[in-house]
Amino acid sequence: MWGALLRRGGGRGAGGLRGLVSVGPPWSQVVSEAEKIVGYPTSFMSLRCLLSDELSNIAMQVRKLVGTKHPLLDTARGFVSDSRNNLQMRGLVILLISKAAGPSTAELSFQHSMVSGIYSSQRSLAEITELIHTAFLVHRGIVNIGELKSCDGPLKDMQFGNKMAVLSGDFLLANACTSLAQLQNTKVVELISSAIGDLVQGIYYENSKSSEENSLTDDIGISTWKEQVFLSHSALLAKSCQAAMELAKHSAEIQDMAFQYGKHMSMSHKLHSDLQPFVKESSSDTMAFSLNSAPAVLHQEFLGREAWIKQIRELREAIKAGKGVTSAIDLCRCHGKRALAALERFPPSEARAALANIVYAVTRFP
């Protein structure tokens, strides 16, 4: 039987895992409780970097973009006000799974560096992962100058915004790579480097299809969609979870289970996000959604390419009425079950309970 959420009625972290259920704490509460378990809010993890003189100077320059519609402004606002508690999710999961795995049995010489059941190197890795994710978020804020409209803002300001997006993203990525080298673990460097390569490949695909975002999606199928989403959304977290186990010298089996949890939890998170325009009761008819989202791709598979093209102008309602949404929900929960199954290999604890609650939060729908 698939594992699932820890019982919330008894002692925390003391129970086994059971099936996915339809009730539980909201996402914000899940994040808040998890932050207490790892020792401090993950929103402060990258504080040393974000308060550096170099980044402070960048922030001053970004203020010049106020009054324009450059996406770098929205990214900067997200750092200050993260209402959905999504920005630091990756670092939080890494810290939780590090604590859930417990102390290493293979290497005892560095256990004095543990704080709240987490090695200092694992906390550094969580910061590195967040810096890499933030760097790519900033780089995604680069706009296509050729597609600008007069209402977006003066051309020189938009060009300046692009330069700031490139330079600030590069600065964050350089800091992440420097900290990664300081971990002095060749396998961890290899894992995170390959995750960066996966991110580049996944985002390149997304950008190459951006001109088709509001027209027709490719006839890619859900298996190809999964591969692309793994590269752009899941690889960094999955490989970072595995790297956290490597830093503590855990077995290859535990490393693989950590990878599987990170992969399937982040896939569920992406599916949950894709489904919001179709399942949220308060969503308006103008709420944006991607034609390359899971519901759209699955709807196309069930409907057929020719009929899909005929329905393109009424796509949102067609997807809601078809099998794409229910199939995407099932797929989201399938990945959630696989993430929870990976957690079975970790001993019962508050950290494991928090990881299970995160999975539940991203597999719950109205």
Image (spheres, helix red, strand yellow):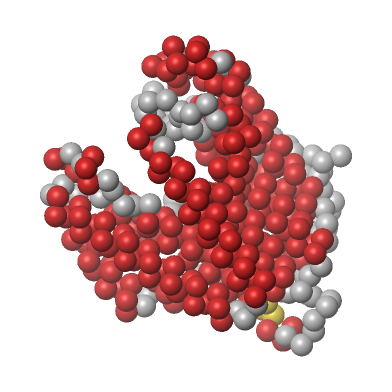
- 337 is higher (above) or lower (below) than 123: above
Which residue appears at 28% of the width and 48% of the height? 143
Q: In the figure, is residue 327 to the left or right of 10?
A: left
* Quarter of the rendering occupied by the N terminus: top right
Q: In the figure, is residue 364 to the left or right of 249?
A: left
Q: Which of the 4 quarters of the picture holds residue 63? A: bottom left
Depth order, front residue of 147/114: 147
Q: Position of residue 49 (x, y in %)?
A: 42, 74
Q: Position of residue 180 (x, y in %)?
A: 55, 74
Q: In the figure, is residue 13 to the left or right of 90?
A: right
Depth order, front residue of 90/39: 90
Q: In the figure, is residue 153 to the left or right of 96?
A: left
- 131 is higher (above) or lower (below) than 237: below
Which residue appears at 52% of the width and 26% of the height? 219
- 186 is higher (above) or lower (below) than 96: below
Depth order, front residue of 319/143: 143
Q: Position of residue 284 (x, y in %)?
A: 40, 26
Depth order, front residue of 123/257: 257
Any part of residue 349 in sight: no
Which residue appears at 83% of the width and 57% of the height? 345
Total number of numbered discs in the rendering: 0
Q: Position of residue 87 (x, y in %)?
A: 48, 56
Which residue appears at 83% of the width and 78% of the height? 106
Any part of residue 184 in sight: yes
* Quarter of the rendering occupied by the C terminus: top right
